[in-house]
Image (tube, rainbow, N blue to C red):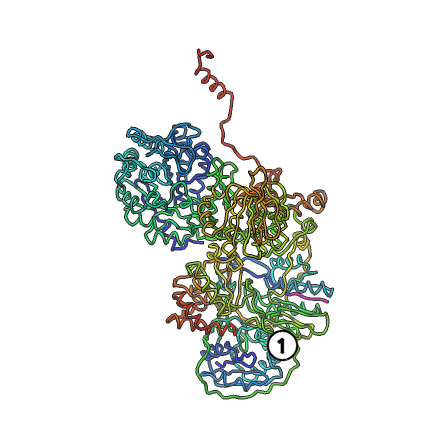
Amino acid sequence: MSVLVVAEHLRGQIRDVTRELITAGREVGPVTVAVIGQDPGSLVDAVNIDGVTEIVTVTIGAGEFENDAYQAAVEALIADRKPRLTLLGFTVNSMGYGPAAAVKLGLGFASDVHGIALEGDAVIATRSFYGSKVSAELEFPGVNGVMLLLRPTVWSPAEGVGNSSVTALDVAAVPSRARHLELIEATAASDVDITQADFLLSIGRGIGDKENVEMFKELAEKMGATLSVSRPLVDAGWMPSSRQVGQSGKTVKPTVYLAFGISGAVQHLAGMKTSGTIIAVNTDPEAAIFNVAQYGAKADLFDVAEELEKLY
Amino acid sequence: MKTVVCIKQVLQLGDEVEFTADGLDVDPDYLDPALNEWDSFATEEALQLRERLGGEVVLVTCGSKQSEAALRRCLAMGADRAIRIEGVDRDPFSVARALADVVSAENSDLVLCGVQSSDAVQAATGTALAELLDLPRAAVITKLDYSGAGTAVVDRELEGGLIDRVEVDTPAVLTIQTGINQPRYANLRAIKQAEQVEIDVRSAAGGGTPAYRVRKMFVPDRGEGAEMLNGSPAEIAARIASIVKERLA
Amino acid sequence: MARDPKHDILFEPIKIGPKIMKNRFYQVPHCNGFGSEKPFSQAYFRALKAEGGFAGVSTEYCSISPESDDTHRMSARIWDDGDIKNLSLMCDMLHEHDALAACELWYGGPHAPNMESRCVARGPSQIPSDFEFLTYAIEADKDDIRHLQNLYVAAAKRARTAGFDIVYVYGSHSYLPQQFLTPYYNHRTDEYGGSFENRARFWRETIEMVKEAVGDDCAICVRMSTDMFMGEAGTQLKRDCLPFVELCDDLVDVWDINLSGIAEWGEDATPSRFYPQGRALPWQAAVKAISKKPVLGVGRWTNPDLMAEAINEGKLDIIATCRPSTSDPFLPKKIDEGRLDDIRECIGCNVCISRWEIGGPPLICTQNATAGEEYRRGWHPERFTKAKNADNDVLVVGAGPAGMDCAMILGKRGMRRVHLVEAQDDMGGTMRWIPQLPGLGEWARIVNYRKIQIDKLKNVEFIPNTKLSAKDVAEYGAEIVIVATGSYWSTDGLNGASHATIDGADASLAWQATPDQIMGEGKELAGDSVVVFDNDGYYTGVSMAEKLALEGKKVTLMTPLGTIGPYMHFTLEAPNQHRTLHRLGVEIVPYHLPSRVEEGVVVATHVYDEEGHEKSFAADGVVWVAQRRSNEALFRELKDSIGLEQLKAEGVDSLYRIGDCEAPRLTADAVFSGHRLAREIDSDDPSLPLPFKRERRMVDDASVASEKAEYAALYAGASLS
């Protein structure tokens, strides 16, 4: 089955999700990677990865992402290469044009997909519903092709240098109705508003003593994370309740939630399980937090924390 | 200035779950309806535009009679009128097609949608709707500057908090991110008054292929999600550092 | 929800002597202010815990004789047939829930003031009590010892008759058997004093006699304090207690192991300010390691994981609770049903205990407003009736503890819509910052519990960040409006000692502050030294002093009272709080009231100095913990400026206020106030509490006639001398 992967890039760098899409795609069939941009040639090397059979470049006017140009390019690519499956990252950029192209071309469509299977010629996608409490298998009857937006971090980034051909596809320029003006760095997350933080380092009862809070505070600072806590630490008076994640605290959705020594009481999970990527370190392999985490480590918290500190 | 806000009554699942007999969805007895969180921000943004520029805020939703509770919630916040479209499948393309017929007839200056719904998280309806209406659009908006004509300047919130400032021609469809404003509360009097408002009920024209069909719904295996990182503390730390770096990039 | 399998161990039955306890949850003896004089209040209070899943429930300390009368403090008594009858009600009601009933036989020795009975107690040595002024005991000779042991036996038999399943020979908290065992109390040189064998003799003999008398029918429980924390003189684990366990293990069916003597029994009933849950576990485990019998022990247990761990690690057999069982009588049932987020966890504030220490009043609970109200007001903590006026919408203004509890109970009573509106961005009111005071973290449970419950109630909506004006309230659209806007600390030095403001006091100045400003608004005082003026008398003044001292300031804690934080004596927090402040170098200035303040100096006089000599205390800053005032502006405006008539025209039928907005008070009482209004929101006049049932003897014609006849017979034929 032919697969089209649309590379995503920002400020002249291929984003990691692209390599994940390649991993997912090459499990299904030969992968064509589309690089769309002002100077796509400069990005070709970064996607010339084992399993990629063809790289197609599309040159557009805009330096950064613009949804009309991307949509036109992807529509042209699909018309030209007729992939059975088109893969995009489930990212803010894809949200701006993916569903538009799919509804226009009559493709099957699903986003935030975390599993792909083939049954003969049919694509079966798995994704979650209802606050990730249930999963569903989706099928796409009566369509010409399928576009899936894949959840980041599920597939590991593809490795290995490829031997791909590079071709250019000319796509007529379309007027851009939503024009990129500038990129603005996020203002530093406020120290106490954990709901606004992009990266939370969260600690729980497993850290043992009050004295250890300081160590994780320092680690958070070094890693550029905001420190949050589970309820027992607030109950113990070690941290103010403004830092508390959970049903009786704050509901948070950071891009990364790194948990040390949090077992994952339901009330805690309720406050953080929709975080982008959850990484949990706990000494108890049965800890419930592993059920919602994408990455888990059964290890001594302090050893891992010490090693992490060395890396920053 | 007329703004159409497309809203959804989402269904929230509690701690326990049972499926319908055909296994294709959760038994409704286990689902609690609520206004989609994103849509209260979209409604607030529309109300603020009306306060600044005058005009009208029109709500549209797809759903059964039960979903009128979500419309009334937004009416209580101050929206002017509400339209409910019956007989629509729940997939984003079916919803977008049904909305397109109604929204197009409204000839509004802006169409606001929530970025996504909390029960499905497709983040697709607004963008698909824009395509069907052939309107400019921008997704995941955390700031909107609009004077009522010409172009709007919006901030899109990218991964990692980076802001992409974009100029959009109008009329346009914008999908609104939480946190763009602070949605107002509705007092009890407004809630009571909203209960009396007559809702314009339409039927969907139908047609078009749905985005997907659910063939099976199930509770994921315990621990399905976590990939366990093995090795020495140093190796684990290195993996964590690289994952963090990737995600925040 | 189902029970978590890792908690299964907590629900395994266990044999104690001739009885089987159906699970591992047990309510150890603790006072409630009802004794045997208020039998219905007593029985309903205890039975509720059995209904909530406790497999064994005890009386409080139960006096075995008028020689052991703790008046003014309220104990149970099992002196005669009347007491048997009254206590049998409790036993019957416990048995209806398949729970075992326990009776803690108590003899106080020199600690019993006998103010009602006017008897004289007997004890091992004639040394006055270290707990109670002016009480001495008779130094018991051998006949007295026999007499004492017979009192235990007779009382044990009466307990059996009343229906008790477990009988205690209670020897902790410095009561009689512990006095014999401990050199601090026992200075004897006969065979009941001196060596371990001699000091243990009284207790062992007494246990033997009680076992002989009732041991076939009742389990024999021994409650023993295993450390008094006073060195050689006090009871010691290794020297006294472990040998005693070995000596008596064959006689005892279950050991109830705790800590402390009576003078500092806060080492047993530990305030959360100083100790986490499970504090006594090492001592309990030491007994468990050498005993063949089940060991039970308190530890302010609220966390089922820690409970299961204590049993799985072989440190305890039975989870004993007093305060957590009052805070949530349904603790076992909620664990059984996997409803952990519904547990109303004890915060360890010891306000319950303060009522016993004060002497007389029934216990109250900060977390559970229904504690003590089971019979007299008929309040059940887990059952609610639909309000008769449930078709009304309610606006509660202010989401502090009172407003939260009120909104929660109104929600549970099925009011159509309840809006809880708060000016700040989250619930809690002052209870958002109080848990940030040193050691008070667990007090956050007051807010956490209610927040989770409110979140679950579909008819209750929380609206943050919204400060309502009187006009907003009037036009809100609620038929019932409840104002719960709390209170603030006076900023001008107004206080309950002088009933006047203090010259120069003005917390709007940079060098002066109130607790609200420091904790709620983050105000910081410049400089190295500070005077904390405290005329509140509870935790706020001492906590501010402790916090500022921890931050490195030189702190002077000044109060017109004779001691700092006197109410903390009743909550058992005082001894360790004194130690803490002493360790931090806080200078305590009692009996002093500032007459004026100016930048850099507090000028004060001794309250008993008739000539008013002034003394200056140099200080860079001043913190006023003088008194609180209700935040009643909104209420007054609604009632006085808009007026009830105009409110009616807007559709507001009723206007109430609750909590500190009425009058500042203990958090427990503020919560009670909100709870009470919600419970009685459909009464004829909810602004006034419904009368509660009072257990008292009622006079009727027959009793008048018989009492008069009995009295007349006393003096038949005796003329005035």
Q: Find residue B148 and report its horizontal and vertical position in percent.
A: 72, 69
In the picture, measured across the screen, residue B133 lies left or right of residue C409, that is: right
In the picture, measured across the screen, residue C653 lies left or right of residue A290, that is: right
Q: Is residue C193 above or below residue A84?
A: above
| Front residue (pair B147, C433) | C433
SS class, disc 1: strand
Q: Find residue C355 and report its horizontal and vertical position in percent.
A: 48, 39
Q: Residue at x 38, y 32 (%)?
A: C136
Q: Is residue C250 magenta?
A: no
| Front residue (pair C660, C652) | C660
Taken as a whole, is the magenta stretch helix, strand or loop? strand
What chain is tagged by disc 1?
A
| Front residue (pair C368, C285) | C285
Quadrant of res A215: bottom left
Q: Specify start and end residues of the magenta stretch as a single range.
A: B1-5
Mark 1 Cα-neighbour bin, 10 Å: few <14, some 14–19, many ≥20: few
Amino acid type at mark 1 = Glu
Disc 1 marks which residue? Answer: A182
